[in-house]
Image: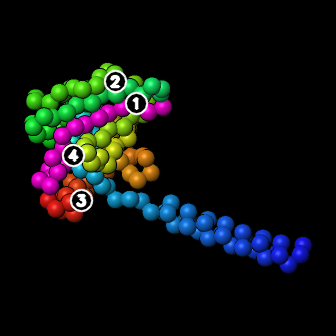
């Protein structure tokens, strides 16, 4: 191997080692519960729990299926009505309007995503399956993570994190 090829191989190996180390560091980080929305079951039905935050007025909510084409969707808009603390998915709260309804139920073997919007700002989505919601212990909620996933956390931890997020938004 000539000097140029050896130098190139050494640089490539060094870059790959650095990338592997960075990937290891990033995968070791578990993001704290974040976002103003979390999923739970209310009366056995999927519900989006919304943390109180005066800095953000949720004016629309969307849920959609993942892994199927075309995706099934459910979308509601508020007009001027404030959302309740728990929004039962597939039901529009009083004063809200359903603007899209191709999602009409939740299959146990399918993944879904739900997002709340304030004006045009999308709040952190929560990914869930009915099985993950059924597996929650009492006092737990499911929150979205950075890696397009979700995890179960104590509701009090989620509310504390949401309060900090709200404060960061000016609320």
Report which quarter residue 23 is drawn in: bottom right
Question: How many tags in the picture?
Answer: 4
Q: Are marks 1 and 3 in contact (CB under 8 Å)?
A: no
Instruction: State the residue at coordinates (19%, 33%).
Output: 77
Instruction: Determine which residue is flagged by label 4.
Output: 118
**Considering the numbered disc 2 on the image, is that residue within a helix, a strand or a loop?**
loop
Closer to the observer: label 4 or label 3? 4
Across and down, in percent, residue 153 comes to: 31, 51
Instruction: State the residue at coordinates (15%, 55%).
Output: 55
Q: Quadrant of the N terminus?
A: bottom right
Q: CA distance from mark 4 to mark 2?
A: 22 Å
Instruction: Determine which residue is flagged by label 1.
Output: 65
- What mark, if any, has residue 165 been given in the picture? 3
Which of 10/21 is in front?
A: 10
Please determine whether, in this image, residue 123 is positioned above or below residue 91. Answer: below
Q: Quadrant of the C terminus?
A: bottom left
Q: Are marks 4 and 2 in contact (CB under 8 Å)?
A: no
Sequence-wise first label, 4 or 2: 2
Q: Are marks 2 and 1 in contact (CB under 8 Å)?
A: yes
Instruction: Determine which residue is flagged by label 2.
Output: 103
Q: CA distance from mark 3 to mark 2?
A: 30 Å
């Amino acid at each position: 191997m000539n000097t140029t090829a050896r130098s190139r191989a050494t640089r490539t190996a060094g870059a790959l080692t650095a990338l592997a180390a960075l990937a290891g560091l990033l995968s070791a980080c578990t993001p704290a519960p974040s976002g103003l929305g979390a999923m739970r079951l209310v009366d056995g039905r999927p519900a989006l729990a919304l943390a109180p935050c005066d800095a953000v007025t949720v004016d629309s909510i969307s849920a959609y299926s993942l892994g199927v084409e075309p995706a099934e969707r459910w979308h509601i808009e508020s007009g001027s009505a404030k959302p309740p603390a728990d929004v039962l998915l597939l039901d529009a709260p009083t004063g809200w309007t359903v603007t899209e309804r191709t999602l009409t139920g939740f299959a146990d073997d399918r993944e879904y995503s739900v997002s709340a919007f304030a004006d045009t700002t999308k709040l952190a989505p929560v990914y869930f399956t009915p099985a993950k919601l059924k597996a929650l212990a009492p006092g737990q909620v499911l929150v979205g993570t950075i890696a397009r996933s979700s995890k179960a956390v104590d509701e009090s931890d989620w509310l504390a994190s949401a309060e900090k997020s709200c404060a960061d938004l000016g609320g």
